[in-house]
Image (tube, rainbow, N blue to C red):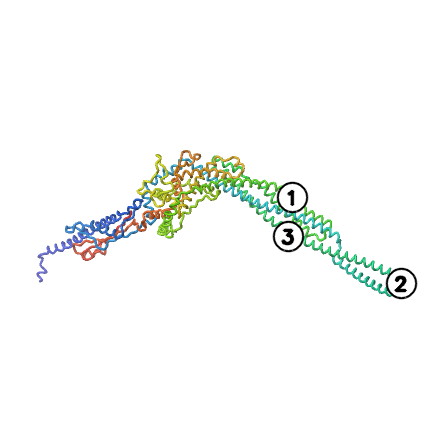
Amino acid sequence: MKRFLLSENGTVSVYLILIIVPIFLFQAVLIDFARIKVAEKETESALHAAARSVMSSFDPELQKRGLYGMGLSQEASEKLLKDVFDQNLSGGVSANAFHFINNKAVDGALRVTPVYTLASHVIFESQLIEDMKIKAPIEYTLEIVDKFQKSGVREPFQIGSQFAKEASEIEKLIEEREGSLDEAWQSAEVLYTRTTEFHSYYRTRVAELDKLAAEIGIHTVDEVRGEISQVQENLRSLTASIRNMDLSLASFAQAGPEAAASIQSLVEAKSRLEEQAGMLSQKLNELEALVRKIMTYTALVISTKLEVAADERVIKQLQQVIEPTLRLAKQKNDEIRSKLTGISRSSAQGDSAAYGVFQHVSLIGDDYFYQYQTSIASIAALFSTFRSAVESVILYTSVHTSEVNQANDSYLAIANDFHTKQSPLEKSRMDTNEATTTNKQTQKNKIQAIMDQAKQAIGGCSLTSTQSGDGVSYSKLQGESGYYQKYRQANAQDTMIGNDVAYDIEKAEPASLRAMDMLEVINSAAEVLRDELYVNEYALTKFNFRTYGLEKDPSGNPKLSNELIDPGTHALVNQEVEYLLYGFSSCAANMSSAYAEMFSLRLAIRTVEALLDPKKELLQIGSPLLVFLAAAAQGAAEAFVDMNALVKGEAVELSSKLSSSALKLTYKDYLRLFLMLHSNNTKLMSRIQALHELETGKDLNQATSYIQANATSEIRLWFIPQVMKLLDGTGLLGCKVVGTQCQMNRAAVVSY
């Protein structure tokens, strides 16, 4: 044994074995590692090919509408995924042949997971943009931007819109000023009437007090009552004496003729006493009458002071109404002056003749307000002086009476002078306002008459279709659980119906002014975002509208769609774009909204044309709104004619007076413009989705456009699986060692 251990025979062999075995093990591991990496690439490639094959089975009905969604059920898609995946693995090519990796699919590990559907606005919009990215910019440039930019209407539109806005602002200030002045004058008239009444009343009262004072003199009630008591006492004494004389006369009468002399003497004495008693009775009556006069005088003095104080409060209250109202009128007058100054300095008015009306707007001088307020304040102050004079008088002597009457006459003199000067001014002002108001109402009536005709001519909906098919279709689209609400909810959005766009042609003035606002919006309409533009053009090319089939090409043939599915065959006949734009639940509501907005725009354009050549006599009146309404009345008549042509599919010249080149737009052009003006992609896309489901019957929630495919494959390890398993935890392998197999889990994401 010792010799064996110490022997050097075979050392080289052992040494070689120690070197070759690790090299062999390394090569074995390297070979399996290389096979695993090749298998990984093959698995990923096979899975992507299988996923693409699944996505290639798109729904042909949706594809005709420019949309791509899977046309397979979940079970069919997973079966297709498995078949293609198996056939793209080396183990599935030929089972009996030798394969370097021999990669095979693991049963039960394949699945297809839908991630996004066409119900998602993000996915839906991306597909619309993809479909329209070539067509939309070309048509948009040719049909809208170039037309407006090359026509030269931007400046007239800006001027017309600015004039309408400034006319409305100035007119509002004028109306507020004139309303305040009317209110002030109404109160001033009351003030004048009351001062006249007060003067007459107190003139009579002072005369009555003066007369009573003269009759009473310097007597007081106590003094007169003392005299009355004394007279009454004397009268009682005389009465007792006369009664005694009557008894004595009776006694003498019984005495006979010898008492005749005594009787005669008593009779004479009694007569004198009776005469004195009569005089005392008369004096008593006079004294009692004097007491009553004193009491009456005292009551009148007190009541006069109370009345004049109450009347002063009336005057003060009227003053407190008039003066703030005048201040408000002056404030509005100053604002008008400031606005007119700004307008005169503005370069926006260009050469528009209509701006001449601002030179004739009535401005009231500051002297008017100063004199007005001063007169009112003087009347109130002088009445207060009169009240002080009345309160200071106790006994109306001739001097006091004269002072009170003079104070009474003073405020009336100022009131008469004020009314004499101010009344003609106010009458002239109110007559002018009344004439202007009548003229404005005449123009409004003209506009209203045209609008009433326009409302009668809206039409656009077939009576039979509205009663039958359309009602059912709109119920599906926007019923209690309609398609529109479904897609709004799918995108976590509110389900409110409508597009917050409500044009009407009910009232002449607001409709005319709002129409002019559209011109300013149109001038900046080209700034619309590209993606919104694509969605709008998709709506116009894939769906029908009121004049679809009526518009003619240069050859005189009807313009029809080149889409795979003719929009003219859709369930909603010639009304889909109007529905997409306004979103109401009836043909009539959508058509009337489109008609009203289109009429408003034509009204605005025709009004601008009329403002270029306004009637000079209207400019002299100085009412900007009147000039505008007169132009709007003329524009409304021409706009109605335009609308009759547009709804027949004819092209109407944008403006022969405003544009530098001939430019004609059709009904479709205006719809394109309105889609741009009222861009609201979320609601618009929900309505487009709803219309697609109405036409195809396909729920876009089930139309998958983005999937994730998962699959697992495995290869058999050739050498030392235990060593490979040790490497499994390092993350180098990219597979999981299960026995002698190495399994690879892979995922692939594919979308249209």
Q: What residue type is labelled 2?
A: Ser
The residue under label 3 is: 310
Residue 329, given in percent of the width and then of the height, sits at: 56, 44
Quadrant housing residue 127: top left
Crowding around mark 2 (Cα neighbors within 10 Å: few <14, some 14 to 19, many 20+) is some
* Residue 577 at x, y percent in the picture: 37, 44
Left or right, 322 with reference to 258: left
The numbered disc on residue 416 is 1
Q: SS for tag 2?
A: helix
Work out whether 149 lies above or below 239: above
Tell which residue pokes out farthest to the front in this image. 464
Q: Answer above or below: position of 10 versus 377.
A: below
Label number found at residue 262: 2
The foreground one among 57 and 453 is 453
Q: Is residue 515 left or right of residue 469?
A: right
In the image shown, does 433 or 354 lie closer to the viewer?
433
Query: Residue shown at 88%/62% (left/top)?
Result: 263
| Contact check, label 3 and label 1, Cβ < 8 Å | no
